[in-house]
Image (cartoon, coloured by chain):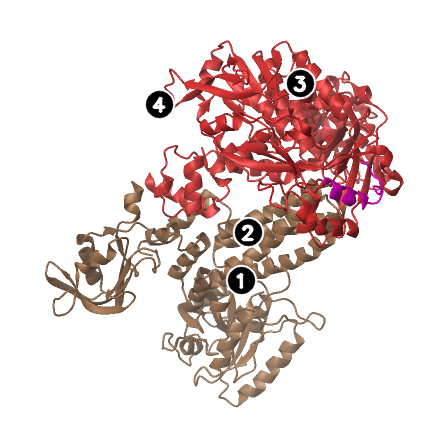
Chain colours: A brown, B red
Amino acid sequence: MWSSQQNDVIVAIATPPGRGALGVVRLSGAGALEVVRRIFFATNGKAGKMRPHRMEYGNIRMDGTVIDEVMLCAMPAPKSFTREDVVEIFAHGGPMTMQGVLNAALQSGARLARPGEFTQRAFLNGRINLAQAEAVMDLIHAGSEAARAAGLRQLGGGLSSRISICRNAILRWLAHISLSIDYPEHEEEATNRATILSEGQRVLADMQALLQTANIGRLLREGIKTAIIGAPNAGKSTLLNALLGEDRAIIHELPGTTRDVLTESVQIHGIPLVLMDTAGLRETSDPVEKMGVERSRQAMDEAELILHVIDGSTTADSSVSADGQATQKKIITIINKSDLPEAAQTAQVIKKAAEASERKTPIIPISAKTGAGLDKLLDAIRKTIFNASTNGNTATAGFVATPTANKNNPPPDFLVIQDFAETDVITRERHRVLLVEAIEFLQQALAELEAGVAEDMVAIALRGAYLSLGHILGEEYADDIIDRIFAEFCVGK
Amino acid sequence: MSASDNGRNAGMTRHIVVIGGGHAGVEAALAAARRGVRVTLFVLSLDSIAMMPCNPCIGGSAKGHLVREIDALGGEMGRAIDATYLQSRMLNASKGPAVYSLRAQADKKRYMTYMKQVLENEPNIALREGEVVEVITAQSVADDTKASGENLNVSAVRTESCTIIPCNAVIVCAGTYLNARCLHGETVTATGPAGMRNATFLTDNLHKLGFVLQRFKTGTPARVHARSIDFSQMAVQHGDETLVPFSFETDPADIARPQIPCYLTYTTPHTHQIIRDNLHRSAMYSGLIDATGTRYCPSIEDKIVRFADKERHPVFIEPEGEDTAEMYVQGMSSALAVEVQEQVYRSVPGLENCEIMRPAYAIEYDCIDATQLTMGLEAKHISGLFFAGQINGSSGYEEAAAQGLIAGINASGFPLVLTRAQAYIGVLIDDLVTKGTIEPYRMMTSRAEYRLLLRQDNADLRLTEIGHAAGLINEARYACFTQKRDVIATEITRLKKITLSPEAVNPLLTEKNTPPLTSGAKAADLIKRPELTYDDILRILPQHKQEDDFAALDDVAEPIKQNAAVAPAAFPPFIQAAINAQINIQIKYEGYISMQIEQAAQFAKTEEKPLPPDLDYENITGLRLEARQKLSRLRPANFGQASRITGVSPADLSILMIYLKAKV
């Protein structure tokens, strides 16, 4: 019977498997404190103190043997994540130690948690709603500081409130339409098409802006594939090492040293980048280097951001530049070796060329060797990634191409996400799909209104949009969603 | 399934008592009697059968749909109003076909006379004047389908003269008569509507039988003498030139008549001032009434108080009948003292000298909490006891009649439950028995999820098959119906196959100001153009010499020839017109219709997920308290029903779903 299971004490290792400096074992359920009391002792062997919401120090013992020296925090119901009694034990992170603490808890009366059970309890106890439950998953899977911040923000319900505003507006229009249908004799109350149309454009814009963030959300979770390209010996590998802060790539002044694509993950200002250092692009007869060049081109194709490194000490390699320009990817042009006197002149040449071209890409002079200009580069990366595309190309998954800029159509302002904790970002694929659906419904409704389609028919699409938004919030009921959500959780979260 | 169903299906000799001869009682009695069951219909007064104590009209938005559905199932209301209407209009004609709604002004007296005669002519119905004071129940026997021993069965009714009349089922259609009080100003009378006597015993009986009772309130405006109205200050509202009858069987040519106009005027700031100054003289605001009124048709006092910023409210003047000078003043329902009513009415342009013949009044009455009923309108805890009409918390003649029909069909042994995707009647009953209502319930199109599927034009296609199975549609009508249905389907298929050449259609397209074709197009696709209708396309279809124009279309030529040969010319013109209109709508709105069919199918998936009848909701701690209590009390049969219970949120449903999954 579930009700007996519902409050029993569950336990799991809450940190990822493998070796870490610290690891957390978490318990939840009525009696969790008692279970821990049986295994937690002060260093002098007396019963350990467990003041609510305080870190306590002591030993975990089993059968009189000290298993580990730990810190723990007891959180009595309902002031805990699950609204049940919760204890978190911070132990040393080796697999043996963690398993030992877990076993002690199991022997003391706890049961091993099923996948997702902690979150499920939080949900069942009304601590979090569905959207928040999903946000928990984002926190768990957060690949970066920024993704974590976005997850936290969603957990707080920021996304919910933005979607609610759109949904309420649609509900209001539906009410107006219903009024004119159900009280036809009161014609003065009739719906004002123009009002819905103008309000509708605003709501649509809101929803589209939110959808824009879906790309950012995905990138935050998965990392942004960034290819470092450039002519041989332009200093690509030096740049990689500078960005990583360690000597990862072998650098040598001999051109063509990098023969394969090196891939490294790094966080820059909390933004996850997957850096791909490539072989220099040049015509070569060396079969090995040829393969390297081939792979470089592949890497470019896969990349969402390209860092094009130009050797500031010589004139730019026009063919590589053309390669970069030909793609629709986001590009940052880096003029390396700014510590050399020739670099300034090269920069002038490049800038002139860039001004003549259709595309405006940032041009950043740096010295990968001395680190000069790296700050500016990081800033440019950040701005380029979160450049809010306002060209209406909303439904495009993945990176949206930088809009063509000219005098009549200036480049859009940068949307710089200063602090993800204050910005609502769509991070879940399920949300994105539903949002796209809602946008399509709303676009259909607005088009129909403009075409003079009868209001009650327009209401069908409006209702579709209303339902889709409701599903994001969990305010419309659909059982398959619940299955999907909780199937994604892993033990201990 | 109720305990008594088995007995009924076994073909026992049956006798049903119907309590009340209003719109619910009439349909209930007729449905049961026409199904071959003996019926005794008790009315407090034979002169009040099918009375319309409030507005003199049938239909309107969503209500018109209900009447069409009643007719499609074999009920009487549609034919009755067709025979006695004074004016007919199709409302919402400027909107989409889903919300076209018929409304007709009724000649009240003639409507009552019509219905009384129909009842008198029905051999299985005994009409009895008298008050039923008690429903008598007995322990049911030989019922192994229910576990508990507390099964009650209806066995008889007792009348005021202490006569006991045995019966197998009772349908309570007591309307607004139970402990009714009428109020205006400081005056309170213990009467039912329109000064009729009320019924004072049944409430206690129902209470003892375990029903939860509520007290509702509704009201009606004054009737004024036609000679005292200055119609020249009002806008005239005529009926439609093209008449659409309510009944699918009625030929408009047979009921054509000079229609009687209605009139429109508006309240003035002066009206509002008088009301504000005299609110204490309204029984509604002086504390005399504590029953719950409806938001859907508020009194004029309510309108002024609740919508203080509105400058004026519309007032419609409608005839009560051809044999009377009484005029109904729609929009001015009130519980103000009569002398204040007079001032208020006389502040309205055109009513400056009006003579009030009957004052406006509010009426309070007892009704049950319909959540104690099944979808067949039978009490969950007493087999054979049915309820229909305003006693269930609804308002309106049409809502009452629809329930009466369903109760009559079910009580007479044909278990019939209509779903929300099938009929407005399904929406109505599901709302009443699942959500319950805390104010008089009015049908509205916005209550239906699948408005486009539940059109008034296709009520017969949706329901006549069911009416026939229930034995309420005779063979002649059924034969005509099936032929109509098949012709529509065949023709739509044909139109989707026929390709029309530019030469054939371009003259028509030019005439209708729509872009000409450069290559062939399917006839159905042309009908989808906003400028064109099926009738337009039909004009050019017969002109085709099949051998010439279809010769190039080898693969379709044969079926077209065959179909053309099948097409009958035997329909009366009004049915042919309905067929053409139906084809036009189904093709034009195909995209929207299929969208709603898909939504309905998804809905059905959740709808059918069963909830265990013995589920202990109190134990599911994640559910909010209100949800726990409601679910425990109402015990919904499935997730669909649970989702519609007021106070059960989607979050509660998610918790319920996870709880059930975890339990397995």
Q: In this view, does B519 lie to the left or right of A129?
A: right
Share a chain, discs 2 and 4?
Answer: no
Share a chain, discs 3 and 2?
Answer: no
What range of the chain is rendered magenta?
Answer: B338-355
Q: Cβ–Cβ below 8 Å for labels 3 and 2?
A: no
Q: How far apart are marks 4 and 1 (CA)?
A: 62 Å
Q: Is residue A219 magenta?
A: no
Q: Nearer the viewer, mark 2 or mark 4?
A: 4
Q: Nearer the viewer, mark 3 or mark 2?
A: 3
Decide: is B498 above or below A88.
above
Question: Mark 4 packing: few (<14 Cα in 10 Å), some, or many (20+)?
Answer: few
Chain bearing tag 1 is A
Instruction: Name the residue that disc number 2 marks.
Output: A469
Please report whichever mark, 3 or 4, sits nearer to the chain's N-terminal start: 3
**Residue B46 badge:** 3
Q: What residue type is labelled 3?
A: Leu
Q: Which amino acid does label 1 sit on?
A: Thr
Does dot 3 land on a helix, a strand or a loop?
helix
Q: Which amino acid does label 2 sit on?
A: Leu
Seen at 48% across and 46% down, the residue is B649
Front-most of A242 and A167?
A167
Share a chain, discs 3 and 4?
Answer: yes
Seen at 65% across and 59% down, the residue is A202
Does dot 4 land on a helix, a strand or a loop?
loop
Instruction: Name the residue that disc number 1 marks.
Output: A213
Front-most of B297 and A47?
B297
Share a chain, discs 2 and 1?
Answer: yes
Q: What residue type is labelled 4?
A: Gly
